[in-house]
Image: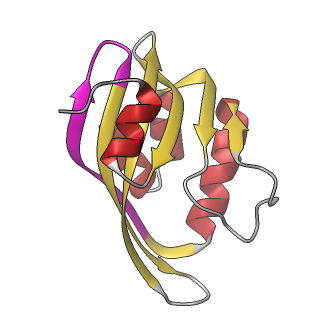
Amino acid sequence: MRRGFEAFSRGDLDAGLAEIHPEVEWHLAFRLPDLPPEKTVFLGHDEVRDLWVAFRGAWDELTLEGEELLHDSDDVLIERVRFRGRGGASGIEVDRVIHYVQEMRDGKLVRIRPFDSAEEAFAAAGVEHG
């Protein structure tokens, strides 16, 4: 999924979506004012593209960098990712670490869920942390 994060960071949404299963379930890491408040999960390529477009539109600068792959099995990855951005309207800078549980099917991302800590991510994935 690292290639997907890199593609998203450079604004190449098509290359990012190429790494994602058509039936993807993308759980939101944090809120954006332009998104419906009750919407926390985005399904399929079209909804994920809309999410990414809204997300990129809210930031003047935005990068997602995979820092460390904490767990790697055939169908579950846990990765520490650094999110850096500067808000378009506010100018506020954000530097935040997110731990993503990434579930794979047919070599593509089919579900992604964000967590604040590695412990939470491992527990949610049902994987022993150690």
Which residues are the magenta region? 62-76
| Left or right: 102 as drawn, with respect to 35 | left
84 versus 36 height, above or below: below
Please name whichever residue, 61 or 12, is drawn nearer the observer in this view of the structure.
Answer: 61
Dominant secondary structure (helix, strand or loop) of the stretch shown in magenta: strand
Task: Determine the image quadrant of residue 54.
Answer: bottom right
Count of marks, rendered view: 0
Q: Is 116 located above or below residue 27 in the figure? A: below
The one nearer the camera, 21 or 75, is 75
Residue 4 visible, this angle: no
Quadrant where the N terminus sits is top left
Q: Is residue 81 magenta?
A: no
Residue name at image x 32 percent, y 52 percent: 81
The reply to whether residue 125 is in sight is yes
Residue 125 position by quadrant: top left
**Quarter placement of the C terminus:** top left
